[in-house]
Amino acid sequence: MNNFTLKVLLLLCLCFSVSAKERFVSYTEAFDVFEIVDQISAWHPNTRSQYRQYFDKTFTLSMSDKLMLDKYAKVRSKYHTLYPDAENSIFSEEAIANDSLSSSFSSQSTVDRSIAFLRKKNKIKDGDLKELVSVYKHFKPQVSKIVRESALLHDEAKRLNKILKKSKILSNIKKLDKFFDLPTHRIKNGRIKLVWLPATSEPMVDYRGGRVIIRMNPVKHSKLIGEDFVLYSLVDSLFVSLSKNKKENFSKIFVDGCPKIKTKSMPKEFWFQAPLVEAFSRYYLKELKNKKAFNPYEIKSSSPWTSSFSSFLYGLSSYSIKRKSKLDREFMTISANYCSQLLSI
C-alpha cells in the first residue's frame, strides 16, 4: 500500500459495519455519503435542492464550505458524461445519468473502499482524487451526524427485502427484465439503493444506470414506503432505462397510432408509460402473487385515463409475457390502437 492510499484511508474514517451479503434492496454508507455530498454541492441542475437547504439551515454553510463544494462540483462535472435525451419522447429520462464516480461508490460498502477502488481502477486522476478526499475530510463532522441517523436505513432495507421476498417479486421481476430486453437483472450491490433524505413531506425517487434510488428519511418516511411504492418505482425504472433509439421509435409508433392523445391535458409520461407501469406493478405482479385471490376491480387508479388504459394494457402485457415476446413495434402498435379506441368512446 503506497503512502497516498494510506493517507486516504486515515483521512476518511467514515466506516460503518456493513453486511457483504448481496441484497436486492440495500443501504451502504459509501453511496449514502456520496449522495449527501453530491446533492449538497448542487453541481447539477437536477440535484435535489432539499439537501442544500437542510444543510445550510442545520449547519450554516460557511465561506470555506462553499469553496469546498465548488471544488467538488468541478471534479464531479469533469467525470460526468452527458447523454442526449430522446427527442419527441413520451418516456421519462434519468435526472442525472450514471458515471464512473456514482457507479464506484454504489459498488462499494464504505467511502474508503470507494476511494481505493477509484484509484486502483484508474477511474480518476490522482490530483482530482486528492481534491475529492479533501472535500470528504472537510465535511466529515457534519456528514457523520447525518449518517448516524441514516444508518437506520439498514433496517429499512431488511424490511423491504422481506416484503419483496414474500411477494415473490424477486423472481417475477426477471420476467419484466426480459420483456423490456434490459440487462437490469445483472445489477449487483443493490438494484434498489436507499439513501438519506431530510424530513420532507414525501420520499423521492431517482433512477440511475438501471438502479432505483429511493431517497427517504428513516424516521418520517418509513410508513410511506411499502410494497406498492417499491413495485411502482421498480417498474418505472425499466422505462427510464430504455435506450434513446427505442424511446424515439416507440414514441413515434404510439403517437402516430393514437394522434388524439396529444389533445389530453397531461404530461407525456402519462399518455402510455404511467398506465403501463400500473398495469405491471398493480395488476400483473399482484396477480402472480395472489393468483386466484387477485381482484382487478378493487384497484383504484390516480386518474380515470390511467384506470381505463391500464386495464387494457394489463391483458395485453400478461399475454405478451406468456408468449415470451418483448416490448417491440407490435406491442406499441396494439397499445396505440387501444388508446385510439378509448379516446373514441
Image (spheres, rainbow, N blue to C red):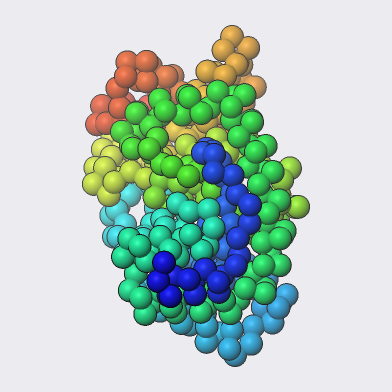
| Residue 73 visible at all | no
The percent coordinates of residue 65 (x first, y second) are 59, 84
Horizontal side of residue 152 vs 126, given as left or right = right
Where, by quadrant of the figure, is residue 286 drawn?
top right
Front residue of 200/312: it is: 200
**Up/down of 265 relative to 29, above or below:** above
| Residue 150 visible at all | yes
Residue at the spot x=46%, y=29% of the render?
A: 173
Numbered-mark total: 0
Where, by quadrant of the figure, is residue 116 drawn?
bottom left
Front residue of 269/181: it is: 181
Residue at the spot x=37%, y=80% of the render?
A: 127
**Up/down of 262 relative to 2, above or below:** above
**Up/down of 270 relative to 53, above or below:** above
Residue at the spot x=23%, y=46% of the render?
A: 245
Front residue of 39/140: it is: 140
The percent coordinates of residue 4 (x first, y second) are 42, 75
